[in-house]
Image (cartoon, rainbow, N blue to C red):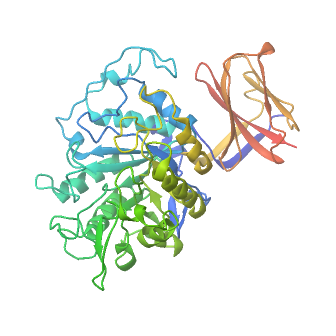
Amino acid sequence: MKKNYILIFTLFLSINLANAQNDCPGNWLSAQGNTLIDSSGNEVILSGVNWFGFETQLSSFHGIWSRDHKSVLQQIKDLGFNSIRVPWHNRMLEPDAAISINSYGTDPVSGVSPMNAEESQFTKPIQLMDALVQWCQDNDLKIILDCHSRNPDAYLEEKRWYTTDFSEERWIEDWVFLANRYKDYDAVIGMDINNEPNGRIDNAEGARWGTNDPANDWRLAAQKCGNAILEANPNVLIIVEGIEAYTKPDGTETSYWWGGNLQGARDFPVVLDNPSKLMYSPHEYGPTVFEQTWFNDPTFPQNMPGIWEEQFNFLNTNGTSPLFVGELGIKTQGGKDEIWFTTFIDYIAEKKLHYTFWALNPNSGDTGGILANDWTSVVQWKMDFLEPILYPPIPNCTGVLSVNDVELENTIQLFPNPTEGFLNIKSRLPIERISIYDLNGRLINKVNFNINPNNNIHKIDVAKLASGFYLAKIETNNSQTVTEKFIKK
């Protein structure tokens, strides 16, 4: 007798834009006090990496000259990151913005040949960004878009969110354009609306907080831009970074990393039309980037938690906002930098902070990368640091899936079902990957297969799973994907 099970769960679904809105309401994220929750109310934590390049003259990912960009994205996911922060510059959206991507050679990780065949047909930066969004939508990788500068490679020069040749209005219009473009893609989960507004107290052109002067008050600009984005896409997170220097109401002057000083939010909080879509974001670096005074304090590193609490974590402590550390990184092992990094990693774990490591790219002058100079090898000691603060994937779809245990029997068979120890999967087609999810859509286990076994039967050990219902997503080597229910006794 045929049985039909209706399971409500959060799970990866391969979808296209045509049916996304109808069949997949979207697993959007929201702030609930200092916790980030998904559309089902489950707590989630963003643990990702930056892949830069769109903010430079190239207006596309760096490393695309050496790797197939989809292979790199898969490597990011395979390393255990659940999100990616993508810096970009506003000029890349102009009508005459152009890119040129070569297609040649074999990707050293995936074996794809020639690399970037589809991408070589792109002539506009936005086309490559579209391809990024689609891949991440299809593969459960969340995206934070980061407006890094108005002009390419100008992030070290631009202190505010506008320049003499690029107005605040154009900056907001560009964000609204992207919000509309990707509003049906719940992979695009956050808009980091301006990277590292900065300026010392004595710099008249610097970004300020709480002055009520539209020319320099970053808080006012963040509210204006954030609400405009939410009008276009009410689901996306508005991520607001700190500034460099802040003058408290009592006249006390404070200074910290560019974008890292959020003390102004204590006195003058950002107010959005939907407060649950606000997420504050500091940046944090060690002495390799700049030898700040606190690194030479005789109490270092014991002094750091107090500094972090004062500069930004008070927002987490008092339940105002979850915190997203959009940038942190380390270049070399040993010394004071590793002491700082170890201390901060422990702090991130303890406080349950969200983060994207800077950077994937080996060509970062400040930190180097997760990838070595060959754009392929992994710098394992960095991943060893990050491994304790990697969190499960956050699926890109919440919906209702009908799982039929008979109709797919001729293609895929699971047995015994229910099972106590091993789950056998028999397929007439070679299986490339099997992923096990719980009914909340959380990935429990993933196994890749390079060789098809005798009798086409694959085995997965599920003995350690708790009793209950699970889903097996089976991907064959001809890109067919089926999802089957099984029961662990």
The quarter of the picture where the N terminus appears is: top right
Q: Estimate the x, y position of residue 431 in percent, counting from the top left.
A: 68, 22
Q: Estimate the x, y position of residue 110 in percent, counting from the top left.
A: 52, 21
Q: Is residue 442 above or below residue 67?
A: below
Look at the image and tell me whether residue 372 can be seen. yes
The quarter of the picture where the C terminus appears is: top right
- Pick whichever, 167 or 322, lies toward us: 322
Residue at x 40%, y 65% (from the top left corner):
294
Q: Residue furthest bottom?
A: 250
- Pick whichever, 69 or 345, lies toward us: 345
Look at the image and tell me whether residue 140 can be seen. no
Answer with left or right where residue 205 lies relative to residue 333: left
Q: Estimate the x, y position of residue 92 in percent, counting from the top left.
A: 23, 40
Answer with left or right where residue 443 lies relative to residue 395: right
Q: Is residue 368 above or below residue 169?
A: above
Q: Residue furthest left?
A: 164
Answer with left or right where residue 435 lies relative to residue 163: right
